[in-house]
Image (cartoon, rainbow, N blue to C red):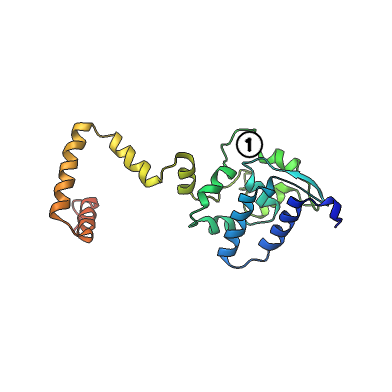
Amino acid sequence: MTDDLVDANGREVIAFTGKVQNLQRVAELTHSIIEMAESGAWREYSTAIGHQRWLDAEYDYFLISCQLQRDDVARVLAWNADSAKLAPLMDRDAPSDRRRPFEKAAEEWSAPGTEPLVRRAERLGWLSRSGQMTASPVPKRARAFAATGLTMEERARRTRAERIPADRRHVLDGIAHQLLEEVPQEHERRYVIDRILRRHDEP
């Protein structure tokens, strides 16, 4: 590979691609994926293959080009607190100035061999049999937090509260306060909640 054809970002991308193909530990792979995302080097780089540019919500396209399995990416992001940081970088609903249709991005990809990017995406599990992108590897709860700044639980609590009139909420708040006084132990309160959630005809 000719050094004068490879810029600084290209060297980072080449190192990343080689590294992720050989990592076995989930923690190391997770760190590498997040570190590359945050570096921004993946956005635009030059190698001996050519110049490559991805829009800022096309990180999943970049990961496909690096031959990462979709399920591997989903697994390493499943329980990582930084997953929400990656959600905007793989936002399927991003406007066209941030994310191109995959087919268009694939046409403009500088392929290192004969395998088209669409075929690579199919092989790696990023495309369904119908040719549609499969679910984002970023967990749903992380995508929700990135979009709203609220966890799914917080959003659900707010939604429930908004569906109840203020005067009724006041009554229910009183019941909750009384329950807290009469049942101070958390495990006992959880037992009460379990009983409430059960069907009335269950033992």
Q: Quadrant of residue 184 in the image?
A: bottom left
List the residue tagged with mark 1.
98
On screen, 142 above or below 23? above
Query: Could you say where residue 43 lies in the image, as x and y percent from the top left?
Result: 69, 45
Task: Report the front residue among 25 and 85.
Answer: 85
- Residue at 64% across, 66% down: 23
Query: Could you say where residue 18 lies in the image, as x and y percent from the top left?
Result: 72, 61
- Residue at 30% across, 34% down: 162
Task: Report the front residue among 105 and 48.
Answer: 48
* Tag 1 secondary structure: loop
Q: Quadrant of residue 160 in the image?
A: top left
The residue most toward the front is 8
Q: Is residue 135 visible?
A: no
**Quarter of the image with the C terminus in it:** bottom left
Number of numbered discs present?
A: 1
Query: Could you say where residue 198 lies in the image, as x and y percent from the top left?
Result: 23, 53
- Residue at 72% across, 59% down: 15
Amino acid beneath label 1: Arg
Q: Is residue 143 visible?
A: yes
- Residue at 72% across, 54% down: 13
On screen, 54 above or below 193? above
Task: Report the front residue among 15 and 58.
Answer: 15
Query: Could you say where residue 22 lies in the image, as x and y percent from the top left?
Result: 67, 66
**Image-based side of 90 in relation to 146, left or right:** right
**Quarter of the image with the N terminus in it:** bottom right
10 Å crowding of disc 1: few (<14), some (14-19), many (20+): some
Q: Quadrant of residue 97 in the image?
A: top right
